[in-house]
């Protein structure tokens, strides 16, 4: 098993259905990394920074982030991660329904690594997630504690 | 709106007539004054002439009397000193002078029959006296003068008669003079009175007219202030309405944006899980196909027909919903685009749209006419979208079996540019004239692809440009879409 297996996937997505579809397709792409799913921003932030198993204290992670969350905007979480000394190298994949150019630009400006629009066309969506899975299998995620 | 007739001096006909009447009186008074002055002046001249004439008569009479007296003096001298030659000469010259004066007097009194008689009488008396004087002279030369008493002397009596007669004549002339002087005074007084009257009339009329006009000017001023106030109120009302509209528009745009995003989310699930369902069905179908046991007919039907049919409907409905949501999203995104005004060459813009549609134009054999188009300053992209939607629609909904004619022209009226897109297409029923501008609403036979978005988009854009879009159409005859826009677009609050 390659080193990347250790990477935890943190999925912040308020829609259970989307979360399930994303997970299914990640698994179909052959990625077996642990996936932690959060449906709101507050508990997700708590996990990222404070949980002993979270990326701030324990190992590298990859964040899948939805922008429309019930309690806050995903943009805020993105800004917080990219502004943090420990977590700023953590790759963030924004995965959302918003295809507004201004929004996309803002995410990249804040340091988002990949921006994926959820299309209604499921085949495209599944394909995108599978690509992401391939991407996950090859990327090297920095050890969050290694450079602290 | 009823129009109020405008009069020269006043807002209402009564006042106007009154002023005209007063002005008429003023002018009449002026003319009367001039006529009166002329008439009275001539009267005065006549009076003066007669006064002078009387004075002339008096002077002449006096001169005559003086000459007559000198004759008498000379005659008496002859009687006293018959040898003194100068008396004879004096008498002769005085007589001839008196006669000349008499002739003069005759001429002067030719106008007065009474005086003619008097002068004639005087003339006769003097003639008699002159004869007596000559006789005296002749007798004196011969030294045969006998004077018993002056009182008994006929010559003396004659001269006395002349004296008293001429005195009476003088008195008469004096009376005449007094009367004529009085006449002259009366005429002068009359002139002054008339001038005074006319002056008073003119002044009175002028004051009245000035007062009325001043009152009217006051009224006009008040009305103008009222109008100004009303105008301002109207402007602020329009501003308030406009900002309300713009707020409402912005609200709708935000609403559309949020709704379309939030609707997308569940749609992703519906599509995703439908695909999952289909995949699961395929797995079951594959498995069943491989198994050898005989399937009940209803199970086979469910797996092979019912499930694919249901899944197919879910898919096509979801796809349609996605298209609608995307349309709303596009609309709201368009609504949030910042508009910027630039000077537009409408003819070029329309030509570019037509060029892009050339294929369809050739296909349908449609004739396109571009008429006069106004110059205006507006957002290029918005106008391009509006016009291309309208022209595309005209091209899309032609009357079958009739070659299409589409005419694009415009004009400027009341400070706005009006652009017309006319066609001879299938037309729109009266009841749909408003509906077609609503989102997802379409009119007539649904034989053309479309979501019912174009005209809603057109109207939203027209509103944002500060304009209006209207349709007039008759079913089976054709439609005219009229876009009216401000000549110069000004970015409002909603576009900030």
Image (tube, rainbow, N blue to C red):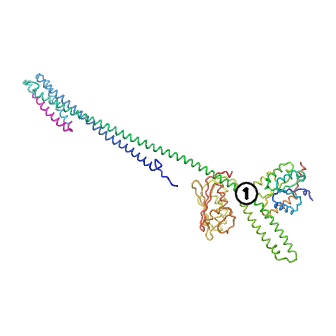
Would you place residue B422 above or below residue B466 in this image? below
Task: Give the main secondary structure, helix, strand or loop, of the magenta stretch.
Answer: helix
Apparent side of residue B477 relative to residue B449 in the rendered image (left or right):
left
Q: Compared to B85, does B33 lie above or below?
A: below
Residue drawn at (84%, 59%) of the image: A132
> x%, y% of residue B476?
60, 68
Label 1: element kind: helix
Left or right of residue A66: residue B431: left
Q: Please give the range of residues in magenta.
A: B108-135
Q: Is residue B153 magenta?
A: no
B81 and B251: which is toward the camera:
B251
Q: Where residue B51 sits: x, y (%)?
A: 26, 35
Q: Chain of mark 1?
A: B
Q: Residues within 10 Å of mark 1 (few under 14, many from 20)?
A: many
Provide the residue designation for mark 1: B257
* Residue B61 pos. (x, y %): 20, 31
From this viewpoint, which residue is outermost toward the right?
A1
User: Quadrant location of residue A114?
Assistant: bottom right
Left or right of residue B173: residue B135: left
């Amino acid at each position: 098993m390659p080193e990347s297996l250790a990477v935890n996937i943190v999925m912040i997505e308020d829609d259970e259905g989307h979360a399930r579809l994303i997970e299914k397709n990640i698994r179909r792409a052959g990625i077996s990394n642990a996936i932690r799913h959060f449906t709101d921003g507050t508990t997700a932030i708590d996990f990222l920074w404070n949980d002993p198993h979270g990326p701030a204290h324990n190992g590298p992670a990859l964040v899948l982030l939805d922008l429309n969350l019930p309690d806050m905007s995903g943009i805020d979480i993105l800004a917080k991660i990219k502004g943090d000394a420990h977590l700023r190298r953590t790759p963030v994949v924004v995965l959302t329904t918003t295809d507004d150019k201004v929004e996309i630009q803002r995410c990249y400006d804040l340091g988002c690594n990949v921006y994926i629009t959820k299309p209604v066309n499921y085949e495209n969506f599944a394909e995108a997630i599978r690509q992401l899975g391939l991407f996950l299998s090859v990327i090297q995620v920095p050890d969050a504690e290694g450079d602290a | 709106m009823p129009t109020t007739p405008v009069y020269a001096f006043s807002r209402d006909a009564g006042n106007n007539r009154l002023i005209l009447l007063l002005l008429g009186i003023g002018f009449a008074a002026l003319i009367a004054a001039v006529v009166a002055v002329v008439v009275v002046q001539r009267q005065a001249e006549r009076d003066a002439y007669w006064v002078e004439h009387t004075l002339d008569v008096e002077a002449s009479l006096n001169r005559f009397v003086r000459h007559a007296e000198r004759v008498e003096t000379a005659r008496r001298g002859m009687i006293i000193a018959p040898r003194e030659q100068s008396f004879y000469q004096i008498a002769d010259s005085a007589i001839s002078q008196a006669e000349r004066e008499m002739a003069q007097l005759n001429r002067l009194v030719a106008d007065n029959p009474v005086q003619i008689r008097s002068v004639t009488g005087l003339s006769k008396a003097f003639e008699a006296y002159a004869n007596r004087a000559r006789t005296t002279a002749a007798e004196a030369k011969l030294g045969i003068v006998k004077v018993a008493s002056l009182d008994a002397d006929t010559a003396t009596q004659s001269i006395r008669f002349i004296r008293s007669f001429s005195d009476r004549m003088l008195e008469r002339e004096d009376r005449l003079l007094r009367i004529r002087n009085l006449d002259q005074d009366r005429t002068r007084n009359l002139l002054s009175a008339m001038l005074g009257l006319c002056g008073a009339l003119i002044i009175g009329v002028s004051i009245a007219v000035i007062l009325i006009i001043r009152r009217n000017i006051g009224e006009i001023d008040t009305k103008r202030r009222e109008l100004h106030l009303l105008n301002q109120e109207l402007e602020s009302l329009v501003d308030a309405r406009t900002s309300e509209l713009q707020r409402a528009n912005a609200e709708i745009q935000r609403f559309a944006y949020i709704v379309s995003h939030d609707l997308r989310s569940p749609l992703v699930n519906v599509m995703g899980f439908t695909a999952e369902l289909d995949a699961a069905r395929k797995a079951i179908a594959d498995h069943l196909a491989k198994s050898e046991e005989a399937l009940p007919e209803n199970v086979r039907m469910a797996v092979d027909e019912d499930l694919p049919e249901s899944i197919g409907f879910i898919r096509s409905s979801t796809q349609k919903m996605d298209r609608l949501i995307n349309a709303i999203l596009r609309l709201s995104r368009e609504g949030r685009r910042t508009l910027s005004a630039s000077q537009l060459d409408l003819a070029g813009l329309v030509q570019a749209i037509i060029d892009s549609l050339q294929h369809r134009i050739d296909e349908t054999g449609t004739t396109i006419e571009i008429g006069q188009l106004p110059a205006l300053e507006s957002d290029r992209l918005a106008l391009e979208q509006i016009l291309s939607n309208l022209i595309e629609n005209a091209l899309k909904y032609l009357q079958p079996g009739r070659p299409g004619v589409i005419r694009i022209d415009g004009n400027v009226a009341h400070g706005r540019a009006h652009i017309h897109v006319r066609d001879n297409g299938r037309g729109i029923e009266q009841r749909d004239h408003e509906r077609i501008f609503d989102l997802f609403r379409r009119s007539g036979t649904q034989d053309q692809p479309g979501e019912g978005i174009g005209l809603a988009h057109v109207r939203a854009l027209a509103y944002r440009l500060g304009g209006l879009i209207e349709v007039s159409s008759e079913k089976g005859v054709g439609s005219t879409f009229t876009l009216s826009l401000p000549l110069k677009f000004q970015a409002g609050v909603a576009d900030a």
